[in-house]
């Protein structure tokens, strides 16, 4: 059970070459991605309508793709324009075309009907070429259902435990206190100040500052987060409102969780400080990114273990705790959109977990 | 759903030693193969009737086989002749014996009731010791359902695409035009002339000749093909009838697709030119065979990819095209025989594909 | 379908450290094992009640365990004593605690309700520290259902075949004749004399002696066996009663088969001669143990092959033979206990095999 009417991240833009094709699977559907001669991204069903051979093993012929099993040729709209050995091409000879966009360094694919694709719903990720930031990028694969990763990212109390030695810095206040969480139309917003925050060992992030953290988590699993460090007292002065003054340090991360199948997911991420900070100290982006990579492996370890336990007992009824509020609100958003587009209640791990 | 009343190729004759036993699985049934002291092939169920231990892990005792789990001993008919620790041997103490033949360098096993085995139905493959031909042999395993391989072999239009750089030689006329296809009692016959055919780089196969290709495809998946090259004009002179004159070149290939399980298959093949051609140029057999081996890997790549897509969407309804005529006629033969022996309609990938 | 109200061997005592935790799965249930500061073994469900993360990836805090996903802390009884970020702890916030014992060098876990655990039902295995014996120990994993291993161990006629070259010593009398088998409350007892037994090549076990062999096989799969060699004539003199005189040689083996999942099992074993024999010839324990290790690999080979055949044909109806009496009586014990604790008939491989 997956949401279809939304934009999934299929690949990094730089992983899709100007010529050739790449194959990706999203929510169990095989896709072939290519750029046409005008530079636009074209995404088709990676499955010939004749015998199911993947078009990604086929041949580009201009903007068309020829299946290299029996030679059927498809144009960019997915329409079959040639069937070797016959004149007539039946109207049902086509593969599905998906709406796709190349934006913010990601290839986004709308998994619902292409006609319903709404470009205004692409989350406002920050691209790798954004001049304001100095970002590095990567991705890892999970042997886990995407919902378990969403749950993880909608509740940062886990930082105190999973990331005790990386992101956490030995500070368990992310677990002892709660952030402000707001429901959005297609996700949630999480915000919090941390006073007297631990340092990170580079300029701008000294121990004892006020730290502001704010992120949106949007369907089908896109996290956009800004962190800022301010001098001690900044939060109190503004009565804990979002900061408006120039920070001592700021960083931004865009992350996207894409469901491949029920039990596999791909996790894309970029992270980095403001460009001006990287200019002042060129080691900062790498330092930050290496920490993030280690931390993401910590997440993967616990979530894949969780998945194995869930497989042994798929009907487990989870205990609901206070910190589940973020995951629960996010699941409500998923439920609402699933009901709207599929007209039925979702069946998902722990679907009964509701707002605590 | 597999046909049982037919001869499956279980092994190359040279892979079955005079002593000892080998284990093979055909259509999900484990078999143990051996040669008795008279040199006849004996094939028994590879599963002791007591506790299902494989007899192939047992011990030959003359023509008998002793299960080396609890010592039950079986004669060549499958009858249990000794149960250690007791005098009485109940009549149901037996393993199934299958009818088997050693012919044309292959071990053939009749998977239906042995009484119904009809030696006259063994396809007329050409053995490796046939003095008229100089043949080399091999086999590869597929992670794919056997029907997908039958489909492939019943429609050579794929040669223009899958084998563009091997068998195809850049000539797409196998796809642009159709061969003559005839239904046989237990298969189909495919025949065609290709005029001005591409050369192969060895004596007898020069570019520009008339090429004759004729094969039978017989249940449960045996392809017997003869190709001949003739001087340009030969086909037209005979009004495109099968050739009767001496060819400049001729080669023969015997191939057999054996279903192991629903998603695994074994593919046996031999190929080579006439003995007289190999005598004149001893490099020709290897040149031909190396080309075939590369081409068979090309088939495997596309068919295993097709299988993976089919697994993602087992209910896919294929588009039927003109070139499906061969596969569809062959599926009709399978359907007819399955209905006859099992009294019900088959359930198979794309069983709805019918003659186009 | 597994018996729950019995003691399963989860690990060797020496594999459970004083600090830290180890994870084990028994009958599909994930367990975390630890020793508290008083040295007692504590076994909890290895699955946090919040989100199913394994506690074994968590942190010991004194005798408590903190889940390192969101920080829930559990005491030794399985009760949750802290939920970060909230004051209230609902009563259902707990993981299951299993009754466990450290006895005879094994960690035993009662898989039924802890209240019903009955320490008097722990089988009387011989610990590695028993001064009367000189034992070595090991364990191997099977890709096979535990019942197939129980069947194997309840019928030693297989020694003549599976272990022809190890335990069997070329003597097939274990297959040609039957032992005395008695049903116990929770298992079976197997006893036999072998006259003129083959030698083993070390002092005390010379060819031609009378050999006494006696073992109990107890749910859920514990074998406790004593073998003795006596001067020829001993058995006849006592009218084949159990020996009472001092043996020339004696050895003891404790073995335990623990079901991990339906198709995986772990097999624990120790073996060795009397301490006085090891003192006289220190090579004997290793000689005996190496033979046992080779023999256990022989068992694994045939049983895993049997499992593969059984997977191809799960509904196979086995032929019942005389030597099935041991396995059948043992299956009756399993059936009786399963009916008692689960109120229904078991569904297991070959459950129809009854006393022959």
Image: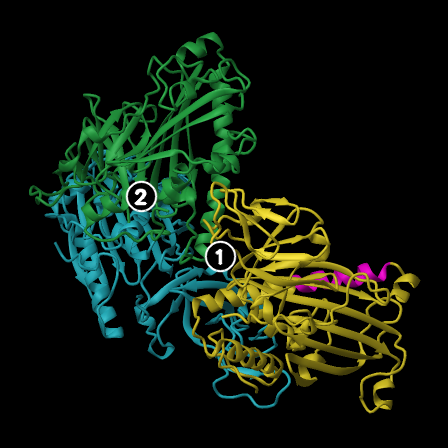
Chain colours: A yellow, B green, C cyan
Residue visible at 41% across and 38% down in the picture? B155
Q: Main secondary structure of the magenta part?
A: helix
Query: Is C333 a magenta residue?
Result: no
The extreme top residue here reads: B280
Mark linked to residue A91:
1
* Left or right placement of residue A220 versus residue B94 in this view: right
Judging from the image, what secondary structure is the residue with disc 1 in?
Answer: loop
Mark linked to residue A333:
none
Q: Which residues are magenta?
A: A283-297
Considering only vertical position in the picture, is C243 above or below B96?
below
How many numbered marks, from 0 up?
A: 2
What's the CA distance linking mark 1 and mark 2? 57 Å
The quarter of the rendered structure image containing the C terminus of chain A is bottom right
Determine crowd level at label 1: few under 14, some 14-19, many 20+ residues with C-alpha closer than 10 A.
few
Judging from the image, what secondary structure is the residue with disc 2 in?
Answer: helix
Q: Horizontal and vertical percent for residue B275?
A: 40, 12
Query: Is A284 a magenta residue?
Result: yes
Specify the quadrant of the image occupied by residue C219. bottom left
Which is more toward the observer, C312 or C207? C312
* Residue picked out by circle 2: C302
Considering only vertical position in the picture, is C300 above or below A182?
above
Residues flagged by tags 1 and 2 on a common chain: no
């Amino acid at each position: 059970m997956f949401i279809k009417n939304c934009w999934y991240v299929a690949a990094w833009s730089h992983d899709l070459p100007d010529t050739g094709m790449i194959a990706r699977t999203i929510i169990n559907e095989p896709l072939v991605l290519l750029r046409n001669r005008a530079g636009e991204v074209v995404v088709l069903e990676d499955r010939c309508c004749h015998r199911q051979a993947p078009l990604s093993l086929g041949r580009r012929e201009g903007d068309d793709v020829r299946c290299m099993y029996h030679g059927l040729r498809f144009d960019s709209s997915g329409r079959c324009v040639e069937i070797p050995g016959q004149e007539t091409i039946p109207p049902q000879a086509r593969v599905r075309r998906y709406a796709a966009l190349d934006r913010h360094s990601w290839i986004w694919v709308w998994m619902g009907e292409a006609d319903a694709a709404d470009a205004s719903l692409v989350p406002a990720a920050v691209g790798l070429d954004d001049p304001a930031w100095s970002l590095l990028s990567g991705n890892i694969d999970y042997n886990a259902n995407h919902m378990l990763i969403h749950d993880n990212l909608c509740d940062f109390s886990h930082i105190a435990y999973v990331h005790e030695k990386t992101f956490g810095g030995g500070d368990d206040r992310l677990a002892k206190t709660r952030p402000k969480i707001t429901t959005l139309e297609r996700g949630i917003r999480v915000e919090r100040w941390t006073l007297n925050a631990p340092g990170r060992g580079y300029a701008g992030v000294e121990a004892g500052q006020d730290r502001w953290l704010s992120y949106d988590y949007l369907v089908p699993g896109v996290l956009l987060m800004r962190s800022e460090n301010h001098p001690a007292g900044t939060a109190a002065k503004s009565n804990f409102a979002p900061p408006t003054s120039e920070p001592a340090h700021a960083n931004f991360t865009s992350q996207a969780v894409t469901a491949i199948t029920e039990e596999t997911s791909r996790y894309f991420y970029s992270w980095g400080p403001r460009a001006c900070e990287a200019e002042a100290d060129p080691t900062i982006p790498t330092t930050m990114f290496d920490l993030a990579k280690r931390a993401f492996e910590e997440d993967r370890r616990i979530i894949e273990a969780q998945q194995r336990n869930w497989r042994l007992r798929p009907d487990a009824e989870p205990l609901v705790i206070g910190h589940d509020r973020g995951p629960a609100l996010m699941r409500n958003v998923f439920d609402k959109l699933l009901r709207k587009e599929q007209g039925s209640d979702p069946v998902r791990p722990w679907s009964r977990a509701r707002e605590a």
